[in-house]
Amino acid sequence: MISSPLTGLPQVVASLAQGYVSIRRVRRFLLLTELQQACLPPPYKRAETKSGTGGLDHAYPEESDIPKGKLYIVVGAVGTGKSSLLLAILNEMFRASGEITRQEFKTPNVMALGVTVALKPDNRLKGSIAYVPQQAWCMNATVKANILFGSQMDPRRYKEVISMCCLLPDLEQLPQGELTEIGERGINLSGGQKQRISLARAVYQQADIYLLDDPLSAVDAHVANSLFEDVIGPRGLLKNTTRVLVTHRLVNLEEADQIVCLSRTLAIDHFSENEEFSEGVEKSKINLAETNMRYSVGESFITEMGTFSELMQENGTFACYFNSFTKEEWADVQNDDNEQNREYCTEDLATNNSCSSQAEGAEQDKPHCEQPQCRDIHRLGSSVGTSKRLVEEEKSATGGLRWDVTKTYIMAYGRHSAVFTAVSYVLFILSSVGTNLWIRHWSQHGTTHRQESSDNTDTRDYFLGIYGLFVVLQTLSTLAILISQAHGTAYASNNLHLRLLESVLRAPSSFFDTTPTGRIVNRFSKDIEAVDMRFPMCLRVASFSLGTALSSLILICVALPWFIVPLIPLTLALIGIQRVYIRTARQLKRIDSVRRSPIFCHFQESLLGSTLLRAYSKVSQFVAISDYLVDESQMSRYALISCQRWMSVRIEMIGHISTLIACLLFLATNVSPSYAGLIITHTMSVAIALMNVLRSTANLENCFVDVERIKEYSEIPSEAPLHLEEGDPDGAKWPTGGEIVFKNYSTRYREGLPLTLRSISLHIRSGEKLGIVGRTGAGKSTLTLALFRLIEATEGHIFIDGVDIGKIGLHDLRSKITVIPQDPVLFAGTLRFNLDPTKERSDEELWAALEGAHMKEFIEEQPNKLDFICAEGGWNLRILVLKDGTVAECDTPWNLLADSNSLFYAMAKEADIIA
């Protein structure tokens, strides 16, 4: 009776330790500093900002007045705090100093960046804030749901918004129009389409203040002009609202009521620790000969504010920023504003280049949203089929477990480990039965034989010696079972995880278009955790409990042969209860696993859009949705636990009945009290053991549901083979020149969808530089996907130096092509790993690459050189650009590359890093 509690004691201790660690982690997270709730009522008619500083060292002037209905355009170099200013208004940054006053109420915890805002009581007006972030955020829902964003439907307003935001042509192209699902993170749309939907969402809210963080950067010049003229500008849809627009488009500056120019001073000089930071900020010159230099990022300041003409007359910071553009660049911008019907690709892109395609359907639009027609590349459809939804609901299997699921785990467990575990388990049962039978024989011998003390001692030693052998055998078999199970289950978990990871990594891009990330995370988290943790525990409990039950039952049946008669119906009753439980519990487990995926999806989506949700005051709605999803998941979980209790009550009842029957049989037979006590003890332990057996075996089958789900994702159709024995070119010689030929090439994103590119014929000679232009969503990035065979051809071919890329292995193709994606990706790890993950390049080649990217000097200053640790996403990397001995720019590489007017962008272009 004591063996079961002692067996479970280590698990209890481990669970307590895990719980303690989890509570500490949760406590540490809950005690983190939180952004204070804004005391600023969602906005008033007018506001003033007074001096303050924020967590990112941005400072603002002593006082600035923002009246209602005006257009404020915020400009400045990259990294000067333009986006931070908008986030400060939204209370999304930590306040370093300053305060907010409203009427007679004062609080130091209102605006995160520390801008003091004095709201004038005489001009109070209730309203709301609408925010358009620089990176568009979209829900995994329809286009219409993303625009309405929980607001009531107003057909007239809705039509006006989608028309002014240039969305009508896009909706006409989508198979289901406004009801088309855009997929997770807007995977079904281009960057420009997502940005226009984000803008339309803000416009539809009819707010009083609009914070627009460079919403025109992701669209082409013609659409940008239309959006500014019809929506943002002084004659647009938002003309009677307060607009704060961050932009790099200088062509619109003359339309602003006020221009805010931000600049940054970055001090890099040698100064003592006692020296005031403000004095260090004033030192903008850089002495490259100084040693032991100290780096300190200075503050961003609103250096000037006024109308376009006023700021140009002052000839200050804004004038210098504006005049930094060449006359040719300014002329190009003005020409872009005038040429609304300009066509792309009307002439050869290079000398005698062949560029032709077929275009389906004529695109019609309003004059202010005229789409430039491109004869070469035309977006013919979207990646949403008309016959079914983009993201289908996750389906759960039904019926009993298939044999192939069990076979999958056995093969992952390992044949040798399985055989060794089975042999050890048989020895454990034999030793347990032998121990009980030997105790019975010993007790009977002591009752029937009364011997002298000397003979009694010899007999005792004899029985103890045999009993000790059984105990040693039982101990060794137990250790063998534990070791083999630990090795086998760990080996199985590792194999299943590797198969799952390899299958997901080799899945085609269409799989990720139609599968939410939450479902994948669910497989890699909860399902793998079940195989790692719960499966070994259930297997261990089931094996030992079954051994205990069998040994006790054999002892009882040998001692009381008549006990076999009631044992048969009791066993049948137990089997019936288990079958009913397993059928129900298995399906509830499947439902529970499926209902967890939406929780992961919704959490990830809410986390990515947390700033937007707070800005639109939608946090409570999304929390309610999360609560609903958790409740839905807990309903199936509660039903599963209730089902377990249903089984436990009935098993305990049968155990008590078996004990009662054994006691009645003892009364009818002549059995010694000591022997009867032994049998009753084993009868009670049988009830506990049988309950553990049935529960653990049922839980074990539930764990096989997780194996079933892992197996499902381990059998995803994969991409083409990485290597082909026949057809692969000589890796040392191919490609020789880089000539690319598209021959009547057509492709689509998935089966059942319209063609994305149709009949493309294009010849790019070796050494030529080709520019591909077109409206957002026209299919420019699709050409890159086609070159890497991330999407396969439906017809036609692509040749690189005369080799058909469709007939070679993917690794041989992709290892010879380099791409700079729209969204840069850096992995957490060393710089060496990010530059050369396959470890095929020498240090000299890595340093040469860094020198070409103007990063060599920065890396040489780091203590670890090439082993410099890059944070996830590369947030700890900054580029410092000097001009005439002063710091001109300082920001992350991708932010600098995103600004085509930055010096770093020009340097990268000159070094042929970007086209």
Image (cartoon, rainbow, N blue to C red):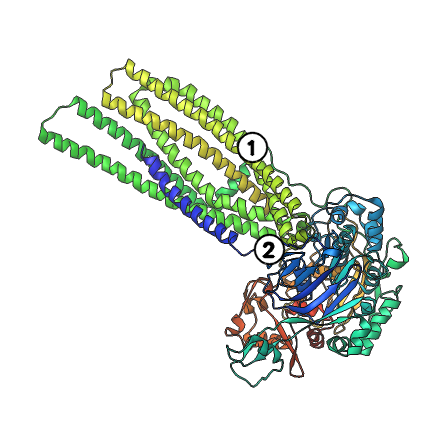
The foreground one among 195 and 74 is 74
Q: Is residue 169 above or below residue 60?
A: above
Expressed as whole percent of the image width and height from the top left, the position of residue 313 reads 80, 78
Name the amino acid, label 2: Gln
Expressed as whole percent of the image width and height from the top left, the position of residue 842 reads 55, 74
Expressed as whole percent of the image width and height from the top left, the position of residue 71 reads 79, 63
The residue lying furthest to the bottom in this view is 289
Element type at mark 2: loop
| Disc 2 and disc 1 in contact, CB within 8 angstroms | no
Q: Is residue 217 left or right of residue 91?
A: right
Q: Is residue 173 above or below residue 783?
A: above
Give the mark nearest the N terminus, 2 or 1: 2
Residue 553 visible in the shown view: no
Give the residue at x 21% y 24%. 444
Judging by the rendered image, the residue that carries numbered circle 2 is 36
Judging by the rendered image, the residue that carries numbered circle 1 is 400
Considering the image in quadrants, where does the N terminus appear? top left
